[in-house]
Image: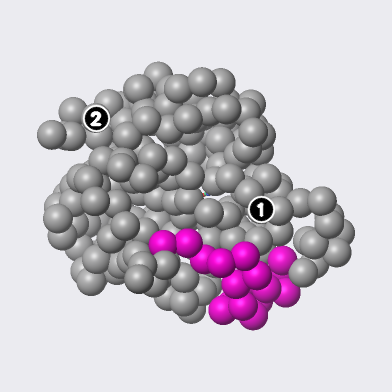
Amino acid sequence: MLTPEAPRGCPLCPRLVAYRMENRAAHPDWWNDPAPSFGDPNARLLVAGLAPGRMGANRTGRPFTGDHAGWLLYDTLKKTGFARGDYDARPDDGLELVDCMITNAVRCAPPGNKPTPAEEATCRPFLVDRLAALPRLQVIVTLGDVSRRNVLKTLGLPGTAIPPGHSVEGQAGPYRLINSYHCSRLNTNTGRLTAEMFEDIFRRAKAMLT
Ligand code: URA
C-alpha cells in the first residue's frame, strides 16, 4: 500500500509538530496540518515545491494557496495549459489542475521556511510514494534547490546528480527533471526569477510530454 500523503496530525518531526501546535493555538481556524498534494492523479507533470508556507498552505490546506508564490505559480500553470478556472487563493476557488499535480518535498510548514536535513529525510518516504502513485508521470519541475535535491534522493540518486541552477535539466531515473528557481517573493521581487523565465520552464515541460 502506498502512502503518498502524510496523515493529518503526522507525529514524525518533533520540531514541526511543535510549530504546528503554536500555529494551531494562535490560529485555530487554520489548516495547521500536513498539506496534501493537489491535482490530477493521472498527471504527467509533477511540480515539487519546498514546504507549505505558514500563511499559505499551512493556513489553507492546499499547496501554494494563499501565499505570494501561488499567484505566479497558478497564473503560469493556467497560461501553459496545466490549470483551468480561476485561482482565488482559496482551496474552494474551483481551480483545477490539468495533467499536473503539485506536491511539496516536506509536507508540514517549517519555521522560517527552512526544513532541516533530518526533516527532509523523515518526510521523504511520502515523496517516494507520491511519485510511485502517479502512473503516467514523465516530467518533474522542481522549484528551488531543496526540492531538486529531495526529488533526486527520492529516486535513489545523489543530490548532485543534476546540478543546481535555473533551467538546468537532466534525466532522473525514469523521469525528466527541470529545475527552476523557486517562485518565492524574494526571487520575484529581486528579478532573479521573472514571469517569462518561469513560463519558459513550463512550456519546455509541456513540450517534453509524449
Ligand atoms: N507553498 C508551498 O506549498 N510550497 C512552497 O514551496 C512554497 C509555498
| 99 or 80, nearer to the observer | 99
On screen, 66 above or below 194? below
Q: Would you say 87 lies left or right of 194 here? A: right
Q: Which residue is mark 2?
A: 206
Q: Quadrant of the N terminus?
A: bottom left
Q: Would you say 27 lies left or right of 166 here? A: right
Mark 1 is on which residue type? Asn
Mark 2 is on which residue type? Lys
Residue occupying the point 83% across, 57% down:
28
On screen, 86 above or below 192? above
Classify 10 Å Cα crowding around label 2: few (below 14), some (14-19), many (20 and above). Answer: some
Percent x, y for residue 156? 23, 71
Q: Is residue 110 magenta?
A: no
Secondary structure beneath dot 1 equals: helix
Classify 10 Å Cα crowding around label 1: few (below 14), some (14-19), many (20 and above). Answer: many
Residue occupying the point 65% across, 61% down:
33
Secondary structure beneath dot 2 equals: helix
